[in-house]
Every structure is written in C-alpha cells, then in structure tokens.
Image: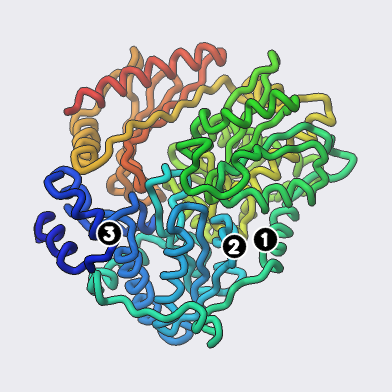
Amino acid sequence: MTYKERYRQWLEKLGEDSELRAELVALEGNEAEIEDRFYQDLSFGTAGLRGKMGAGTNRMNVYTIARATQGVADYIARHGKEAMEKGVVIAHDSRHYSKEFSRLTARILAANGIKVYTFPDLRPTPELAYMVRRLGCISGINITASHNPKEYNGYKAYWEDGCQVSSEIADGMLKKMNEVDLFTGAKGMDFDEAVEKGIITVLGAAYDREYLDLIEGLAIHYGDELDLSIPIVYTPLNGAGAIPFTTMLKDRGFTNWAIVKEQEMPDGDFTTVGYPNPEAPRAFAMSERLGKELGAELLMATDPDADRFAIEIRNDEGEYVWLNGNQTGYIIVNYLLEGKKDAGTLPEKGAMVKSIVTSTMSTIMAESYGVKMFESLTGFKNICGRIPDVEAQGYEYMFGYEESVGYACCPYIRDKDGISAGMMVAEAAAYYKKQGKTLWQVLEGLYEKYGFFAEDEPNLVLEGIEGANRIKRMMTAVRENPPTEIAGAKVVKLVDYKDGYEDIPASNVLRFYLDNNSWFAIRPSGTEPKIKFYFYTCQSSREEALRTNKKIKDDILAIVNAVE
C-alpha cells in the first residue's frame, strides 16, 4: 500500500468527530508531510517505539500504541499461562498523552488476560526497570520519549531480566504486531473494572520506598565523612525526577540544596527549557541563574524520565562548567574505585562496563585498581545485558556507563538511573569538599594522573525520509571510501562492527584508530533522526588534546557533510 493509499484509508476509517481525522484533513495537499506520516510503520526495535505524536502509521497515537500492545500481549501469551500470570508492569513520564497511552496499554493487556501492575502517577524509568525484576514480571512497558522534544513520545519494552528487550525478542514482538489489524485488532477492557477484578494492580508508595532504599544502600561514605552543607541546585526539567531525587537528598542528610521551582512540576510542553536534555548545556540555564544566587557548587539535572543525568561544576575561577558524559563518568568511576579501596570493599575481581563509543580513559583508571573494563554496544540493554556474563565469569559488577550521560550504579537495576547517579555524584562532592577539594580539582587531578584526554560527541540531526536516506548515504560513503589520513594523522586501524567484532555483536558502527593516540567512531542513532560522532585523544596537555580533537572533528565532519 502506498503512502497515499494509507492516508486515504485513515480518512475512511476514522470517525467524523475524530481529532486525528481532523488533523489529517488539515494536511490535504501537503504531500511531504503526508508522505512522512505514512511512508512506513513506526519502527519497533530494541528501543521499542519512538516518534512524533500525531495521526499516521509513522506517528505515536492510540492506534499504533494499541497494535503494539496487542502484539506484545500475543507474544507473551505464546509463552503460556505462567508468563501471563507473571504480568507486565507499566509506567509513564510527564509527556502529553503519556498517562493516556499507559492506561490504554494496561486495558489491552488486561483484556488479554495478562496481569498488570501500574503506578498512580508518573515514575522514573529506572524504577520501572527495577520493578520488572522485583515483581517477577515477564515484561515491562514505559511510555516515555526520554529526553526528546515535546512533540515526541515513546514505548519502551522490557523483558523479565529487567533490560530493554533484545533484538530477538523485539523481532518476535514485531512479528505478532504485524498480524494485528491497526484499527480493529486490539482487545479492550475498562480500566476500573480490571482493577476491581484484580487483573490490574495499582502499586502503592511502599514500592517507591523500596527503590530509594536500594539506591541509598549504594553509599560508600556517610555522616561525618561528608560535608552535607555543600550548596547544590537540582532540576528535574519538568519530568519524573522531582520527588524521588529530592527525597534521596533529604534521606542522605544534605542540608543546603534547592530545586529550580519553574522546572519542578511536570510539564509536557517543557516550557522553561524547550529541549529537555541535560546532555545539552543550555538545559542548565535556569539552574545556573539559581546557582549563582545561592552560591551553589554543584548543579545537577535529570531528563523527563529521570534515567539520564548531567552536572555542571564550578572551575577555579568560579564559573559553571558543563561536564560531558565521559567526564562525569570519570568522577563516578574514580569515586567508586578510590572509595571502595579506602573502605576495604574493592572486589577481588571487580568489573565495570562501558560502551564501545565511550572514552578509554576510564579503562585505564579501572585497570590501575585491578578492575576489568568490559565493552558493549551502546544502550543499556547491552551495557546491563553484560551483567549476567560478567558475573558468570566470577566478577562483581561495580558500574556501567556510556558517554550520553547514562550511568548504571546498581547491578539490580538493569538500566541507566539518574537518581542513583545523582546520589553518587552528590556524595562524591560532599566527600571531597570535606577534604578541601572541589569536583573541578578532582577532575583536573585525574587528567594529571591518567593522561590529558579530550572528548567530543557532536551529532547531525537529519529528520524525515530524506534525512534518514542521507544518513544511510553518509555511512555508506565512509564505509566504502574510508579515510586513510585525518588532520595529519594516519589511520592505523579500522573496525567495522557491521558483522560484529570479537565479543561485540553486529552493529552499524565504524571505529577509526589514528597514529597520534586518537580514535573516533561514527554511528546512526537507533532512536533519533541523528548520525552521531565520537572523538577522543590523549596528548601532552589538556589544551593540546582539545586542539587535536577539534582538528580531527572538523576534518571528519567536512567529509560527511560533503555527502549529498
């Protein structure tokens, strides 16, 4: 069926009073927009569904959500009665229609005879991931688009191991989804009726407390070992983090913190920030203003579903400096290694996990303490998915992270967690302050000790059909005509992960190693209309490292941007 035929089908199937139909009628004559909405089904993969909200097969709406959920229900039913009784736990974030989509998901699963657990209101993604294993569920579903702009929503699917679904499971679910009629194929049941019959259980506050107790149990130092008066500012960026994050700060005894009031309450428009991604320094504008008023030494932010976490710290001149995900990772890795060694709790066979596009400086740090650093593909289904393998080899998992401000501090929570990462960084800041050091001085000391690394992770946003096709052409051009020299440095090794490499599964990633102690990688995003780049180098000074990295970045971006 062509995109035009799909468009006409929707106009015919939707009722005259349908808001989605009115939306489509208003598009009459706008061929580019119609094509973008109907040229494909919204793809379902290991990140579930993610896309702009609106009418169309390539959009998030009640029909695409219903078909996906019926497909998940059919896939679970295929595993038998026991899987259906184990049930599915559902959560949602602060985005528009997130609660409605989560209710729809619960009603469809319940109508299929599958036990459902849900929350009375929005909850962080890591709490959902925790609850999958805590409740012994077969699956978990979170309605969230994480850090994407307000136009987006998503549908994250988890399996019984507490990780996002693997490619094999996602493919199985997708096969079932494709058998469901988009307009009439999903079953339904009244939400309140399902609650009365015990098919749906709304979880109480005791489960929130369990999640926080688990996180707070990760602490390394306590009480007098910390300066709990350190001034801190936190923002949840109008998402799900406000209550759990501030409760954690109170529980840990921090006495001098403030929340950005304009960004405290849920707001699906993200009015005060626009792009609610703490990976972007501009997300800290209001935090900086409040921080200057209060003399804060540490600014912390979580994204709308509170799985991503980022910070700004004061440099020696008193100016706020945003740290990239690698740099925050260095601080956490160092604090864990140093703290556990001093406390005598460093595992005899400790292990950490990082993605293949994350800085190798942390590998050097870990190995200096006798801790092994494993690598994985990007995404926490892969990072946390390595935990069972790590443990099977006799190692004790300590930490996992990737450069895109994601950190997994707890082996029982199989996803990135901005709340536990925030606790570790706040604790580290309070510990070093007690010793008369700032986090800036700690970071500078790490460069002095382990090497002057530089890190940069730019990306190009290319939306729509043409954007997706251009990203494919870019990857093909670099793969088929790889550069042999960049910024005066020779390429000494190229790793193409398209067929896998060593113990890393296949993925659309290219990784280049240069003869000047530098490397870079290129990959398309699996969840956003982006092509991503990762540049790393280690030189004789931080300034030289930054200069070298910029030269390499400029050359590569020039090559890629030349691809039409």
Name the residue tied to disc 2: 130
Q: Closer to us: mark 3 or mark 2?
A: 3
Q: Is residue 452 above or below residue 242?
A: above
* Residue 425 visible in the displayed image: yes
**Residue linked to disc 3:** 20
Amino acid at pointer 1:
Tyr
Mark 3 residue element: helix
Q: Which badge, 3 or 1, comes first in the chain's sequence?
A: 3
Per the image, label 2 sits on a secondary structure element best described as: helix
Q: For mark 1, what is the residue?
A: 211
**Dot 3 amino acid type:** Leu
Residues tagged 1 and 2 counted as in contact (Cβ below 8 A): yes
> In the image, residue 215 lies at what x, y percent?
69, 54
Tally of marks: 3
**Image: 168 above or below 190:** above
Q: Residue at x 33, y 31 (%)?
A: 460
Q: Nearer the viewer, residue 406 or 104?
A: 104
User: Gap in Å between the C-alphas at discs 3 and 2?
Assistant: 35 Å
Find the distance from the CA under tag 1 to the CA under tag 2.
7 Å
Circle 2 Cα neighbour tier, 10 Å, few/some/many (<14 / 14–19 / ≥20): many
Among the two numbered marks 1 and 2 on one chain, the one whose residue lies closer to the N terminus:
2
Residue shown at the point (57%, 55%) measured from the top left = 124
